[in-house]
Image (spheres, grey):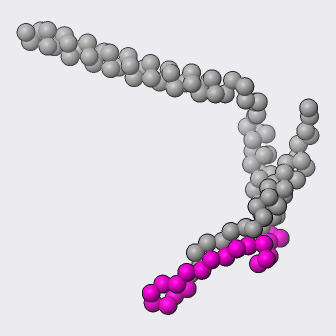
Amino acid sequence: MSESKELLEATIKGLEEKLSQLGGELNAKQQELEDVNKPEMTNEMYNILEDCVGQGIDEACGYLTHDDMEVEFGMEYDGKVYLESIGINDPSSMADRVLEEIHKKFKIVE
């Protein structure tokens, strides 16, 4: 009886290890399937794109005025006022600045 119990426990342990391995392989293949039709980008291109986004946002924020933002304040029980949130009224202008930076650095091809 104890031999069959030990055998079953060993079998279960082996199957659990195999299941874990297959789960890892499944995740890798699912990611590969998601990536199959994505255009490829080198690390250098990604870094340039990341810089473009950062510069575009910095530039857009530099030109913001109080008319471009929606600001909400809050007040605590002891009378202290705090800034609750800041929103940009026209976020597409920020996106336009980012796209301008991208167009400066990349040649867009068909």
- Choose top left, top right, bottom left or bottom right for residue 86: bottom right
**In the rendered picture of this protein, how many numbered marks are placed on residues?**
0
Q: Residue at x 62, y 24 (%)?
A: 32
Q: Residue at x 73, y 73 (%)?
A: 69
Residue 44, horizontal then vertical, whole percent = 77, 39
Look at the image and tell me whether residue 1 can be seen. yes
- Compared to residue 71, the image places residue 76 above or below, namely below
Residue 23, horizontal then vertical, whole percent = 45, 23
Q: Is residue 79 magenta?
A: yes
Q: Residue at x 20, y 16 (%)?
A: 9
Q: Is residue 77 magenta?
A: yes
Span shown in magenta: 62-81
Task: Give 41 or 70, whichever is nearer the viewer.
Answer: 70
Residue 50, horizontal then vertical, whole percent = 74, 48
Look at the image and tell me whether residue 56 can be seen. no
- Compared to residue 92, the image places residue 34 above or below, namely above
Task: Give 12 or 45, whichever is nearer the viewer.
Answer: 12
Q: Residue at x 47, y 24 (%)?
A: 24
Quick one: quadrant of the N terminus?
top left
- Choose top left, top right, bottom left or bottom right for residue 94: bottom right
